[in-house]
Image (tube, rainbow, N blue to C red):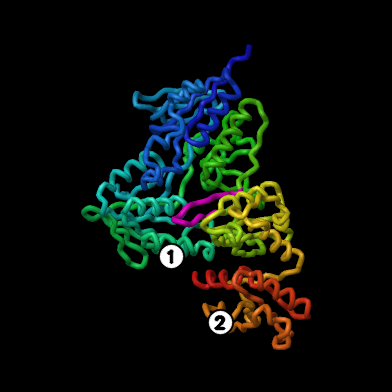
Amino acid sequence: MNKPKKIVIIGGVAAGASAAARLRRLDESAQIIMLERGEYVSYANCGLPYHIGGIIADRNDLIVTKPEKFSNWFNIEVRTSSEVVAIDRANKRVLIKNKAGEYSESYDSLIIATGASAFTSKTDGDENSKIRHLWTMSDMDGIIGALKDKSAKVTIVGGGFIGLETAENLRHRGVGVTLIQRSGHVLPVFDGEMALPLTSELIEMGVNVILGRTVKKYEDVPDGIIAILDNGERVFSNIVISSTGIKPNSALALESGIECSKDGFIKVDEHMRTSDENIYAAGDVVEIDEPIFNSRTHIPLAGPANKQGRIVADNIAGIRSSYRGTYGASVVKLGKLTAASVGMTEKRLKSAGKEYLKIYIHPSSSASYYPGAARMDMKLLFGADGTIYGAQIIGQKGVDKRIDSISQAMFNGLKADMLGALELSYAPPFSSAKDPVNYLGFVASNVLSGKSTPAYADEMPADAIVLDVREPSEVSGGKIPNSINIPLGQLRTRLSELDKSRLIVASCQVGLRGYLAERILKQNGFNAANLSGGYLTWKAVNSK
C-alpha cells in the first residue's frame, strides 16, 4: 500500500485555499496542511472596500471558509498565525514560526501561495503610521477604526482598482476624499481618452482628483498628515491610503534558490511547477504566460489565482493540467459607471514597439428604442493579421458581458473580424440584434479588408480635409476646427465641392455616418478615410 502524500501549502487565501479544497476532492488519503501567517484564510479581499463603505454590512460575509469548515468538510488542517520562515529544499522541510516558537514540517509536495503585498515607493516620511494600505482584513479593520469621526478626510495615493473602489466607498460612508494619481488619468489598464469619464464620475461624487502629480514628502501634523506634492501643493487628511502597486511575497522562494524573475515573481512552467520539481507556486506571487505575444507577465487578479490553485492540485494528484496564461480580463464599478478591459493597452503596445490598428465605437447597451438604453464607449486594438490585442469598454450597462465575450474570443484564438460572427443572445432589454461586440467585428472586418481606412483623432493627417457629415444642428454643439460640413444626405449631390487631390477624412458623431460617407467618396474616386469613433472620440482625445 502506497504511503499517503503529505502536501504543505504556504498561504491560505485565493490560490492556497483553492488548491487545498481541490486536492482533497481528488485525494481522500492525502495529508494536507495549510499554513497562513495571518489570522484569516479564504477571505474575499476584493470585498474589503465595500465593507469600509457599508455596502457589505456584515464583516463575516467576507470570510468564505473558516478553518473549522476546512477541517470538518475537507479534513484539511489549517494553522493560522503560522509563518513559514524558511524552506529546506534538500530535506523537503519548512521552518514555521508561531506564537509558541519555531518548529519544522516535512512535505512531499509544497505549494507556495504567498501572494503579494501592497507596495509604496520610498517617500520621505512614509514610515508614519497614518499611512495605510488596503490589502488584508487587518488593514480594513485599521482603516475603519481610524475613521470613526464622520468629518474625517482621507488621501488616496494611486488610482488603480483598489484606489477607485476605496474612493467610491469612502464617499458612500461620507468621508472626504482626495485622490492623487501620478499619470494623467486614473485606471492604468485603460488608455487616457477612454478613462476620461471615470475622472468625471469621481468629481461628480465629490472626490478631489489630482492628476499628473506625485507625493514627494509626508509631514506629520496633529490629528493628521500632509502629503506634499511635486508642485509644492499640500494636501491634509487624517490618514493616507497608499495604493500605488504590489510586490510579490517571494522572499522564501528567493532565499531557497527557487528561480524568480528580475522583479521577484516566481517562475513556473505551464503546470505551475517551479524550478524545484517538488514545489509548485500559484497566485499573485508567480510570473505567468502572456499569450498575446508569448511573453511573460504578472497579473494579480483573483480569477487567475483560483484557477492556478486548481491546476496545481490537479498536477500533484496526477492529472496533467496546464495553465494557458492570463489575458487580464478585469472590471471595476465606479458610481454609475462600469469600466472593463482585457489584454494590452495602446500605451503598452507603443512601449513594446508593436504595430497595431485601433477602432472606436459608441453603441447602445440595449436596443436604442428600449427604455433605459445607455451609451457604451468601446475601443478594440488588433494586428494587421486580425489578432486581437486588447479591448476597453466603459458605460453604465452591459459592459461586463461584452468584455467577457471579447476575452473568450481572444482565449480561443479568434481574429477581430470573427467577433462579427459570434452568436450572442438578443432581446431588446439586453442588446440589439447586432450586439456591440458583433459591431466591433463588422468594423474590424471593414478595416482588415480595406473597405475602410481608419483615421485617428490623435494623429490626424495635417493636410487632410475633415468632412463633417452631421446635420447643422449637431455641428452647432461643437465641431473639429477647420472642418467643413456637408450633411450625409446631401453628399452625393455636392461631391464637386471637394478636392480629389487631397485626403478627405469623413467625420460624424460616432463613426457610422462617417463610414457611409467614406464608402461614397471612395467609390467616386476620392482618397478617403473615416474618423474612428467620430466626434465623440475626437472630443475625448483632445480634452485629455
- Which image quarter: residue 312? top right
What range is drawn magenta here? 327-340
- Per the rendering, the mark at residue 481 is 2
Residue 334 sits inside the magenta stretch: yes
**Which element carries disc 2, helix, strand or loop?**
loop
- In the figure, is residue 473 to the left or right of 421? left
- Per the rendering, the mark at residue 212 is 1
Tell which of 200 and 464 is nearer to you. Answer: 200
Question: What amino acid type should be assigned to the residue bearing mark 1?
Answer: Gly
Task: Identify the residue at image location x=44%, y=61%.
Answer: 201
Q: Is residue 378 visible?
A: no
**Which element carries disc 1, helix, strand or loop?**
loop
Task: Identify the residue at image location x=38%, y=47%.
Answer: 133
Residue 456 sits inside the magenta stretch: no
- Which image quarter: residue 468? bottom right
Is residue 61 depicted above or below 496 in this figure? above
Percent x, y for residue 289? 62, 45
